[in-house]
Structures are given as C-alpha cells and as structure tokens.
Image (cartoon, helix red, strand yellow):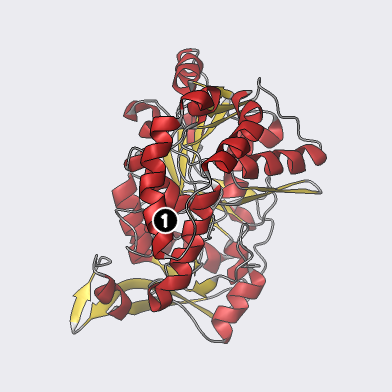
Amino acid sequence: MANVTVIGSQWGDEGKGKIVDWLASRADAVVRFQGGHNAGHTLVVGEQVYKLSLLPSGIVTGTLSIIGNGVVLDPWALRDEMAKLRGQGVEINADNFAIADNCPLILPFHRDLDALRETAAGAGKIGTTGRGIGPAYEDKVGRRAIRVCDLAHLDKLGPQLDRLTAHHDALRAGFGEPPIDRERLIADLSEIADFVLEYAQPVWKRLKKVRKAGARILFEGAQGVLLDVDHGTYPFVTSSNTVSGTAASGSGLGPSAVGFVLGIAKAYTTRVGSGPFPTELEDEVGQRLGERGHEFGTVTGRKRRCGWFDAVLVRQSCAVSGVTGIALTKLDVLDGFDRVRICTGYRLRGKILDYFPSHSADQAEVEPIYEEMDGWHESTAGARSYADLPAQAIKYIQRVQELIETPIALVSTSPEREDTILIRDPFSD
C-alpha cells in the first residue's frame, strides 16, 4: 500500500480538511510536515465540527498524529487547541500524538515582530496572519531558534539566548520597542515545558518503525503550492515550502516515502490576503461564489477573494509538486450558473503565456484568457458517483482534467466525509 501526501494546489483553503479526514480514517499515521498555526482545517464528522490549526487531522479518529520537524510550533496555541478538542470528546495522549523534538518554537516576540512589520509596511503588506510564523522560520534558518528539545535544558539556554536577543533586540529598537525580557521568556518556557515534553521525541525514528511495519502514512500539507516560498506568488507567500517534496525533509523520512501526491483544488479559485489573483471577480458572480462556498478563513475569519477556476495556475502547481492526482472540491458551489468559465492562458503586454510569470509586476498585469462552457442547474450536492452528476458537470470535470494535464482522482460534493466520488484510490497505488 502506498503512502499519500496531500497538498493544496491553489492558495490554500481548498477543502483539504475534509479530504485529509477521509484519508486519515484509512491511514495508520498522519504527519504535519510544514507551516504552523496559520493554517486551518475544518472537519465535519456527523454533527460535530472540528477546527484544527496545528494538530494533524488524524487525531479526531484516534490515528497516530505527528507534528514533524518542518513545522514551527506555538506551544501555547497547541495547548489551547488540545483543550478545545478534548472538550469535544477527542482523546489525545502520548500513544496517539507526538511532536518532533527538533521542531522550532514560535515565541511571543515572534508574534510581536510579525504585527510590527505588517503595520509598518503600508502598501507593501504581505497579509500575514500575524501569528509569528515568518519570524520563527527566520530564526530557524538563522540558527538561533529555540527548539522543543531545548525545553528540557533551559538551564543551558544562555548562548542561544545571546544569539537570539542580539538579533531581535536590534529589530525591536528600530520599532521603538524594549529589549526581550529574558527572565520573563525563561519563566514562560518553564511554565509550558512539561506539557510539550510529554509528547516530544525523535519522530523520524518512530516513523521509520511505522513504515518498516508496512503501515500507511498520510502526510498532511498546509496552505497551498501558490503560497510556497520558492514557487508561489512571491513575496505574497508563506514562509515555508508547501510543495510535496517538503514531506520528506519536514518529517525525517526520505523522498521515497512521499508516495501518491494528491493535490486539492476547488472547482473555482479563492485567495485570502494580498497578492495577485488573475481570475478574481469583484462583481455579483464573485460574491455569489463566496456566499455559496462560505468563503471565510478557518483561522482568521477573513473573507476570501473569489474567482473562476485558473487551469494555468493549477497545471503549474501540479508540475512543480509532482502531483499524481487531483481532488476537485466544492463542485456544488457552481450549481445553478448558466455559464461557467475556466482560465486557459494569460495575455501580458501583447504576449500569450501558458504559465504564471515569476515577477510580481508581471503577475499583477496578466489578463486571463477564458474558455466558456454551459453550466448546470441540477444539484451536485451530496453526489457519490458519476451517475449522480449532471452531464454538464461531468464535462466541466473532464475539461479541467485536460487543461491541468493531471488526472482527477476524486470529486468532493459537500463537507461531509462520505460525499465523495472516488475515481482512483490514492492508497491503492
């Protein structure tokens, strides 16, 4: 049986939570491999709605759930999230949950710096969630991060704090902020240390054992490929690599462990925050998509920008992330449109492009080239087989598949776990 890696193929918010939950019920382990609590997945299981930010989706079903070393961890946010889920009856213990002991921590001053920068940036705002993700990743690559394993050795943290404060105190001074209170920081870390260390371990070792036993591992990505720090709409991106290859480095397993790469894509396009969006609709159609799709961020509650499906962007995402198959979600949101459109290319200053350019000025200027199709008025909500779909909806799915040059593996027709049309089983390849 194959392992499966799930990634977003657009700007995040593609409905990964439902798909990951559906796959997690058949997996033996679920691993988060990048991002932080700036990501959010909503799971609907029966009458219960679970909102997750850090915890892997498998935790709801009791599946072994692991936070890998590629994640930046806010331990206080984790504690709050765990308390909320336990209040909903979810059991979380050292048998079904683990945290990589080499995982970097998000600390209070990271959140401060994130907010200070965004406020000062003016027109250059990135549109971050303000949760300290970027500054924490900066400290990781700057070799000054405090990691989970450091919580067991707080008495030896002096040299690391020297490096950390030398960097941050200079930045804070530039914003008119006082230096980091080292004593307060140590006190805060001491207060949270035992909680985190209960679950800390070398997860690469545990995953190696799981894999050796022939178990199925589900790697759960956050955000989407178009927010990848290398391949996304830079600088309006997140601070980590969101492509499938990060599952290897962010978990401690090699590239061969990645398995079937399932890209998630909405049947239309959305984006939260700033940055280019070629097919954005600032009219009644865009408003209708947003209302029907309940397009508000899981973590921030921010209203998402909406537009037609952009086949150019998804095709590019599939290429750079080695996507094996696509899960097309929220098809039912397109029910009732007389005509639907798909972006098949761009015009840029008189030239036709079949890819999304790298420079932000070019990204902002491209004009979408649309192909128009008849819509459908029958409902697709809750469909569980192709036979349940209107003919025009099937034609739409097939045309999307042709344009993105990647097979459609499954189609999601509602937030409910079972409302899924399975065309190709990722765990069977």
Whether residue 367 is visible here, answered yes or no, is: yes
Q: Nearer the viewer, residue 73 or 16?
A: 73
Q: Is residue 122 left or right of 189 when viewed as pictured?
A: left
Q: Residue furthest left?
A: 351
* Label 1 sits on residue: 238
- Left-right relation of 243 to 218: left
- Image quadrant containing the C terminus: top left
The percent coordinates of residue 24 (x first, y second) are: 60, 35
Q: Going by the image, does 360 lie left or right of 70? A: left
Q: Residues within 10 Å of mark 1 (few under 14, many from 20)?
A: many
Q: Foreground residue, 187 or 150?
A: 187
Q: Residue at 40% across / 78% down in the picture?
A: 123
Task: Look at the numbered disc 1 and give the secondary structure of its residue.
Answer: loop
Q: Mark 1 is on which residue type? A: Thr
Query: Is residue 274 something one can see in this rendering?
Result: no
Q: Nearer the viewer, residue 144 or 104?
A: 144
Residue drawn at the location 47% of the way across and 18% of the way down: 211
Q: Is residue 394 left or right of residue 47?
A: left
Question: Is 383 situated above or below 371?
Answer: above
Q: Residue at x 81, y 40 (%)?
A: 87
